[in-house]
Image (cartoon, helix red, strand yellow):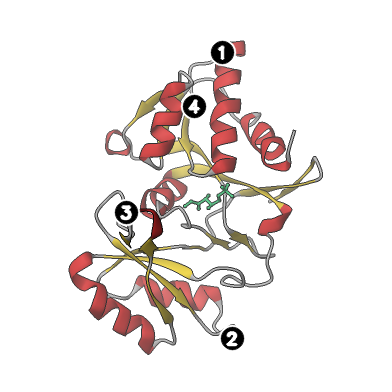
Amino acid sequence: MNDKQAVALEAASYVKNDMIVGLGTGSTANYFIEALATRQQQENLRITTVASSNISMIKAQSVGLTVLSLAQLSQIDLYVDGADEITADNSLLKGRGYDLVMEKLLAKAAKEFIVVADKSKLVSRIGENYPIPIEVMPFAWQAAKRSIEAIGGTGDLRPNAAKDGLCITSYGSLVLDMRFDASLDSHQLNALLNNIPGVVEHGIFAKLASKILIADQGKVETRA
Ligand code: 5RP
């Protein structure tokens, strides 16, 4: 069993009968979906899920989970998802898979948000390994980019290498991948980005995680 499977299995142990469970997106979230389906089958649990992406929805349906739309719900019991970066104060960077709008909605709607990751995701600051993904309305991308540059951001629209064009999200937005100076604290940056017109959502998840499960060589550490 690899580390991503180990944390996914541990996260699945938090699920109880009759829960509504949010499903994240990515390879670790996929292992969670599999572990959840196994528990549902073996223990005959009643579980309803809501997926953060079309990919996760299809994966969940393929393993026999019931998937509802978030439009039918205002709150969920538990959300389990991976992350791209995790700091010591439990701030997260997400959205390399560009489904961050739904991911943040589910993280906020959940009574409990459990993050599942291997040790490679630990960083000393948000933005250390990746630019910050910022989803923008297509007609606003130039204006939003200019506002983001005014607070010190540098970067450009995310390309879609596979399709030889631009990356377009499930909801028709464009993604700006922007880097910021290391001196700009992620909580400050979170507040600044929340205030820019044309920005739909961004990948800094501050103060949203309830628990972070980190696996290192098969051992899972739980941070609250
Ligand atoms: C997608 C995400 C993923 O959770 C993040 O990219 C981690 O993926 P993986 O589990 O494959 O390492 O934020 O938007």
- The alpha-carbon separation of the residues under discs 1 and 4 comes to 15 Å
Which residue is denoted by mark 1 in the rendering? 41
Secondary structure, mark 2, is loop
Circle nearer the N terminus (1, 3): 1
Q: Position of residue 123 (x, y in %)?
A: 68, 66
Structural distance between the alpha carbons of marks 1 and 3: 33 Å
Q: Which residue is under mark 2? A: 183
Distance, label 2 to label 3, CA atoms, is: 30 Å
Q: Which residue position holds label 3?
A: 169
With respect to residue 146, does 55 lie above or below?
Answer: above
Which sits in the foreground, 128 or 92? 128
- Residue plotted at (32% across, 54% down): 169
Q: CA distance from mark 1 to mark 2?
A: 49 Å
Q: Earlier in the sequence, mark 2 or mark 3?
A: 3
Residue 201 sits above or below residue 153 on the image: above
Q: Residues within 10 Å of mark 3 (few under 14, many from 20)?
A: some
Give x and y (percent) for residue 188. 49, 78
Q: Is residue 167 above or below residue 220?
A: below
Task: Specify few, some or many for label 2: CA neighbours under 10 Å numbering under 14, 14-19, or 20 or more.
Answer: few
- Within 10 Å of disc 1 (Cα), the crowding (few <14, some 14-19, many 20+) is some
Q: In the rendered view, does 84 fall on the left or right side of 24?
A: right
Which residue is painted at 75% across and 33% down in the image? Answer: 1
- Report x, y in % for residue 43: 61, 12
